[in-house]
Amino acid sequence: MQFCDECGSMMKSQDGKMVCSGCGATAQKDEERAAEFVSTETQTDDDVIETEEGMSFEGKPTANDVICESCGHTEAWYTIKQTASADEPPTRFFKCKECGYRWREYN
């Protein structure tokens, strides 16, 4: 990776030179490290965590060992995501079946 000397943002390769994604400044490629650079055109959503208000949890497993902080109901849909490094436990994301309140639990 190459970073902008002006603002510190990450630079991307464009037309044979490096262009800052933040301020637009240009610089020559660091040829010694050029083989290490990886450019991507798209990003997948494989690691996106469902946090949007309208996101549906229905049809996913349910948990009976939780209590909703909002309404006190004892059933919630949940999903598990690895949000930290692999040696850390995963995070459980809940949505109350009664009122729709959302919360997370770190193990």
Image (cartoon, rainbow, N blue to C red):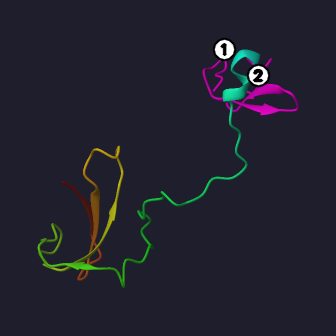
- The answer to which image quadrant residue 28 occupies is top right
The residue tagged with tag 2: helix, strand or loop?
Answer: loop
Q: Is residue 97 rendered to the left or right of residue 51?
A: left
The quarter of the picture where residue 9 lies is top right
Tell me where the magenta segment starts and ends, as one range: 1-30
Q: Residue at x 48, y 57 (%)?
A: 47
Q: Main secondary structure of the magenta part?
A: loop
On the image, numbered disc 1 is attached to which residue?
5
The reply, left or right, for residue 55 in relation to residue 15 is left
Which residue corresponds to the image point at 69% horizontal and 52% vertical from the top-left? 42
Q: Residues within 10 Å of mark 1 (few under 14, many from 20)?
A: few
* Screen quadrant of the N terminus: top right
- 47 w.r.t. 97: above or below: above
The location of residue 67, given as percent across then percent down, is 12, 71
What amino acid is at disc 1? Answer: Asp
Q: Would you name the residue on which mark 2 appears? A: 25
Q: How many marks?
A: 2
Locate residue 68 relative to residue 84 in the image: left or right. Answer: left
Q: Residue furthest front?
A: 35
Q: Is residue 8 magenta?
A: yes
Q: Residue at x 70, y 45 (%)?
A: 40
Q: Do the CB atoms of the residues marked 1 and 2 lie less than 8 Å apart? A: yes
x, y percent for residue 63: 19, 76
Image quadrant occupied by the C terminus? bottom left
Viewer-proximal residue among 17 and 88: 88
Q: Work out whether residue 92 or residue 24 is closer to the camera in this orientation and state it.
A: 92
